[in-house]
Structure formats: structure tokens, C-alpha cells
Image: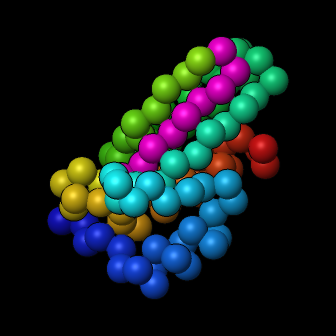
Amino acid sequence: MTSKLGTAQRTKALAQLKGWSHDAKRDAITKTYVFKDFVEAFGFMSKAALIAERMDHHPEWSNVYRTVNVLLTTHDAGGLTEKDVKLARAMDEATGGL
């Protein structure tokens, strides 16, 4: 089982993730991506879904038109873990620097 990040680890990880915020209530990280249009948003979700499947770690997310809201937490660990940080980085890379 993956261990939850400690306070110092969480702070360091968030400092390195552009645009991600800590959701203390869920012990998760969140980000809102805004794309040019629906097709670009859906393309990102397709790329991110393949990445998440390879990592065996899946986001909670929603999409409305060109906006994708993402929440990452590790349910079986009861909060934020390194798996969430790695997926956040991979999702950011999938945007091509958005």
C-alpha cells in the first residue's frame, strides 16, 4: 500500500506543481485546465486516460465544454500520495505546457 505524504512532502510537491491546489477536506490536489475548445479538452482527457491506466491510478474529473476539473487522491491510502503527484506531473506534460 502507498503511504500518504507528510506535511513537508506535500508542501514540496505542491511547490513543484504549477496550478495545482491542496484540497484539505479531501486530502487531495486539484486543478482546472481550460483549453481552446471541446475537442482539445477531450483530446487531453483521452491522453490522460491512457496515462492513468498505465499508472493504474485514476483521476476524479469532470468536463464541461473546454474546461476539465481534476481531483487526485489515493483512496486506498486515505489521501494524497506520491502516485497523485506523479499523475499530476504526467497530466501537465500531456497538455504540452498549458
Q: Quick check: is 66 in the magenta stretch?
A: yes
Image location (x, y in percent) of residue 76: 19, 54
Q: Residue at x 64, y 70 (%)?
A: 16
Q: With respect to residue 42, does 61 lie above or below?
A: below
Looking at the rendering, in which quadrant would you find the N terminus?
bottom left
Considering every residue shown, the one lying at the far front of the view is: 25
Vertical position of residue 23 compared to residue 82: above or below: above
Residue 65: x and y, percent?
Answer: 65, 15
Q: Residue 77's quadrant in the figure? A: bottom left
Residue at 33 percent of width and 52 percent of height:
26
**Residue 50: where, in percent of width, then height?**
48, 35
Q: Residue furthest bottom?
A: 8
Q: Give above or below for 16 relative to 46.
A: below
What kind of secondary structure does the magenta stretch mostly adopt?
Answer: strand
In the rendered view of the protein, which quadrant contains the C terminus? Answer: top right
Where residue 10 appears, as percent x and y from the top left, is 46, 74
Q: Residue at x 45, y 84 (%)?
A: 8
Q: Which residues are magenta?
A: 65-73
Left or right relative to 71: residue 1: left
Display coloring: rainbow
The image quadrant of residue 6 is: bottom left
Q: Nearer the viewer, residue 61 or 87?
A: 61
Name the quadrant containing residue 80.
Answer: bottom left
Residue 59 lies in the magenta stretch: no
Q: How many marks?
A: 0
Does residue 31 sit above or below 5 in this rendering? above
